[in-house]
Image (spheres, rainbow, N blue to C red):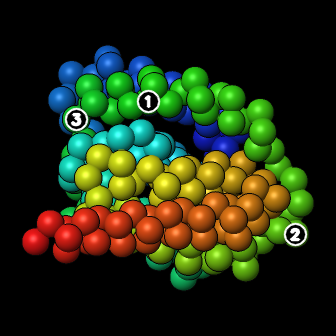
C-alpha cells in the first residue's frame, strides 16, 4: 500500500502539522507522533524540521536538541534502516504545540520557494550509497549544531542540514551531492573557524 504522505508536498505536510497543532487541545506533541505523521518521509522531514530553525539565530539549548535529533536520524540512515525508530528517551520527548506552530508558519513560505528548486532527478545519485553519505554528513553536522557558540553558532550547520533534508525528501540526487560535497564541508569549516575565534578571544581575555 502506498504512503499517502509521500504524494504530498513538503509545505502541505507542514501546513497540516501547523493546523493540527493549532486546533489540538493537547499542549504538547511528542516526536513519535511527528514521525508517525511523516510516514516514509520521516528521515528527510526531521532533518528539515530540526535544520530550518537553526538557519536563524537561536537561543541556547535549542541547537543542542536539534543536533541530538539530527544525529539519531543520521545514524539510522548511515546504518541503512528503512524505517525511522526513535529511542524512547527521544521519541517520548514533547514539543510545545504553540512553538511548533510558530516555527512551521515561518518555515512554510521559504519551503515553498525551495520546493521549486528541488525535484526528483538523477536517481542514480540518490541510491543507497548516497543515503549513507547523507547519514555520515548528518552525523558531523549534528555535532556542529551542538558547538558551544552562542546565538549564531548553529546557522552554518542548520543551512546544510536543511539542504540535505530537502534533497533527501525530494529524492533530488543533484542536490544531495551538493549538500554532501559542498554545503557540509563549508558548514563544518565555518563552524570550526567560529570555535577557533571564540577560544582565541577567550584566551586573550584571560
**Residue under the point 80% across and 44% down:** 119
**Residue under the point 70% across and 70% down:** 181
Whichever of labels 1 and 3 marks the residue nearer the N terminus, that label is 3
Using the image as rendered, state which of residue 111 and residue 200 is in the foreground: 200
Q: Give the residue number, with chain letter if any, for mark 3.
A: 96
Using the image as rendered, state which of residue 90 and residue 194 is in the foreground: 194
- Quick one: label 1, few (<14), some, or many (20+) residues within 10 Å? many
Q: Is residue 199 above or below residue 58?
A: below
**Residue under the point 14% across and 66% down:** 205
User: Residue 78 location, x and y as percent?
Assistant: 56, 79
Is residue 118 visible in this depiction of the protein? yes
How far is the residue under mark 3 from the one under mark 2? 40 Å
Q: Secondary structure at mark 3?
A: strand
State left or right for residue 186 relative to residue 147. Answer: right
Q: Give the residue number, with chain letter if any, for mark 1.
A: 104
User: Residue 155 location, x and y as percent?
Assistant: 44, 50
Whichever of labels 3 and 2 marks the residue nearer the N terminus, that label is 3
Q: Give the residue number, with chain letter if any, for mark 2.
A: 124
Callout 1–callout 3 Cβ contact below 8 Å: no
Q: Is residue 76 above or below residue 3?
A: below
- Quick one: label 2, few (<14), some, or many (20+) residues within 10 Å? few
Name of the residue lying farthest toward the top: 23
Amino acid at each position: 500500500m502506498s504512503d499517502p504522505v509521500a504524494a504530498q508536498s513538503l509545505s502541505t505536510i507542514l501546513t497540516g502539522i501547523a493546523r493540527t497543532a493549532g486546533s489540538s487541545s493537547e499542549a504538547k506533541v511528542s516526536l513519535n507522533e511527528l514521525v508517525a505523521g511523516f510516514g516514509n518521509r520521516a528521515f528527510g522531514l526531521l532533518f528539515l524540521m530540526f535544520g530550518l530553525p537553526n538557519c536563524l539565530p537561536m537561543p541556547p539549548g535549542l541547537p543542542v536538541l536539534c543536533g541530538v535529533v539530527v544525529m539519531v536520524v543520521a545514524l539510522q540512515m548511515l546504518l541503512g534502516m528503512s524505517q525511522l525508530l526513535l529511542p524512547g528517551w527521544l521519541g517520548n520527548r514533547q514539543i510545545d504545540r504553540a512553538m511548533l506552530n510558530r516555527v512551521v508558519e515561518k518555515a512554510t513560505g521559504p519551503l515553498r520557494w525551495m520546493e521549486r528548486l528541488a525535484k526528483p532527478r538523477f536517481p542514480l545519485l540518490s541510491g543507497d550509497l548516497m543515503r549513507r553519505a547523507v547519514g555520515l554528513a548528518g552525523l558531523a553536522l549534528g555535532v556542529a549544531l551542538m558547538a558551544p557558540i552562542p546565538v549564531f553558532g548553529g546557522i552554518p550547520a542548520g543551512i546544510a542540514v536543511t539542504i540535505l533534508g530537502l534533497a533527501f525528501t525530494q529524492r533530488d540526487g543533484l542536490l544531495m551531492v551538493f549538500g554532501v560535497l559542498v554545503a557540509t564541508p563549508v558548514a563544518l569549516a565555518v563552524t570550526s573557524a567560529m570555535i577557533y575565534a571564540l577560544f582565541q578571544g577567550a584566551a586573550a581575555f584571560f
